[in-house]
Image (tube, rainbow, N blue to C red):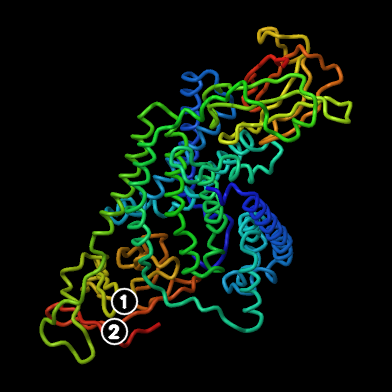
Amino acid sequence: MSVRYKAVGWNRQKKLYDRVLANGVVDNLQLFIGITAVLHPTATAETLLIRSTGTAAIILLHVILAIGPLCRIAARYLPLLYNRRHLGVMMFLLSLIHGALSTIQFHALGDANPIVSIFFAHTDYDSLIDFPFQTLGFLALIIFFLMAATSHDFWLATLTPPIWKGLHMLVYFAYGLVIMHVALGVLQDTRNPGFAIAVGIGLIVILGLHLIASRLPSASPLPEANGSAPAGYEYVGQGSEIPVDRAKTIVVGGERVAVYRVGNPGAGEADSIHAVESVCRHQNGPLGEGRIVDGCITCPWHGFQYDPTTGKSPPPFSEQIRTFPVHLDAKQRIYIQLSEAAS
Amino acid sequence: MSLLLSAGALAAFQLLLGGIAGYLGLGLIAAITLLACGNRGLGAFDEHALRNAEAKSSIGFRVLIFPGLIALWPFVLWRRWRARSGQSVAHGRPHIDRRHRVSWILLLIALPPLFIAAMLSGRTAGPPPIDPQLALSAAGAETGVPLARVTVDAELPEGGYVERLQFRAIVLRADGDAGIWLHTVHAAERPLPPDTLLYWQPNVSDAEEFALAAAYLLGPLPAGEGRLPMPAAYTSDGMLAGYSLARQELLFAEALQTP
């Protein structure tokens, strides 16, 4: 969280995750290079590296882009989300190797500036058949660089969350560039339809997952009043509607409020109800989709935590979200006072 | 597109590259200065960083943020200036971002049709073959005495983005110059592999007799039109060859034809 910066915030799970990631990438490269070397014995080492790193990078990009919607669809994928940043940096490094070797192999040994050569060696920009596809990969690589270079939390604080988020949402544009880079490049060159089918399936899966996730209800409007609400309070639902240690998210006046039911196992007391704003201070994550861990509301995106009563992060951290007064009547009807938010 | 093909576009692009290089150069200086200043350099606007000097000074942290500082140095300096002059930077009220959905809807609309169109478009076989009888149109070629010519039309091995190499070349003795030159005109419609080196071997007329070790290196195959000096040992019998550094193999070997 925010109290101090480390180069990398490793813990046991992240180390395990990174080890699996590194091994997976190395295995993928070895497998690809081995099979290609057998099928195309004349391919040079540079060509093998260009193709293997490019393939690994696009596979990783699809995995990265699938994680977000998967987590919306099923909470069991959330551990992948906590560590998505490392996937992104790994994908950038693979893209960088792919791009650098391609530039050296195809553009650096002539008498023109290699970057000028990328954009001007082949200039059929109005043709789908001979489009200079390398330019698309180059632009995508610049976006990946900016994202990897600003992946540290230092940049989140420096750029502020809205700007940081806007910068990192360029990944969608970069994804489009990468798909067209591959489609207009290697897929038009190869006579094997299997590659085109594989990329097409990847595209359908990614777009389909986002479409499904976007149709999931993430918040409910205020329900109709049930009984007489105390003055200044709004009825938001029954306590029994909310699973223990989970939340119901409602939308009031364009704002999302997470109403949490915090269980008190063994204490002999009833569960308590708390209402907080549903936006995490870290990256605007949906707090209403999180859960209670160690008594704290825990953001599903990166695990930022807040005390449900005060809205403050546990010491020594300093973030705070707004809380709303809650009234729970004898029939377990929940009312919250939206105008009295404490920040 | 004609705009992109024009010399003006190329000059503008080179100017843009120069500007970017200058920007990144300044960024390098700014990044080194900010990191050298430690907390005073970086932490002035960052309350969290100020609380932990030890973390700020770690080498790993500095290495990680260094590339970003080079790329985004104006923003960092602006934040620093705002903080020093007592002006806070508005973070804005946290909000749920709807840009995700908009981005994906745009991709959903645009990407599948483009992908399908790209897949349905087959690669062309390239431009029509060059007419071997066609004279070189280059103005420079007319100013010398033509000694030999050759037309190269080589299918390249798989694995590169260029499938075919086509260019014409003429050996000429330039007017008022004792030197002999190889004047090349590359087929303008196709890119050329920029790693291709041209070799010439005298007294050979068969491709099988060509030996790279015995040949003279003329230089890299120029894009568009260009001239390479021929060695003093030039004779009319000889063979021109192209060797790819990246592929590490001979792309073509063609006998020079005396007009």
Figure check: B111 above or below A107? below
Residue at horizontal 19 percent and vertical 81 percent from the top: A328
Closer to the camera, A91 or A191? A191
Asked if badge 1 and badge 2 are on a common chain, one would say yes
Specify whether B94 is left or right of A261: right
Specify whether A156 is left or right of A225: right
Host chain of mark 2: A
Asked which quadrant contains residue A69, the reply is: bottom left
| Mark 1 crowdedness (10 Å alpha carbons): few <14, some 14-19, many ≥20 | some
Q: Amino acid at mark 1?
A: Glu
Q: Position of residue B96 (x, y in %)?
A: 36, 69
Q: Amino acid at mark 2?
A: Leu
Instruction: Please name the residue that numbered disc 1 is placed on.
Output: A255
Instruction: Please name the residue that numbered disc 2 is placed on.
Output: A338
Figure check: A292 above or below A145? below
Callout 1 touching callout 2 (CB < 8 Å): yes
Closer to the camera, A114 or A8? A114
**Mark 1: which secondary structure?**
strand
Residue at horizontal 26 percent and vertical 85 percent from the top: A337
| Mark 2 crowdedness (10 Å alpha carbons): few <14, some 14-19, many ≥20 | many
Mark whose residue sits in front, 1 or 2: 1
Q: Position of residue B18 (x, y in %)?
A: 70, 55
Asked which quadrant contains residue B228, the reply is: top right
Q: Position of residue B9 (x, y in %)?
A: 62, 52
Closer to the camera, B10 or B96? B10
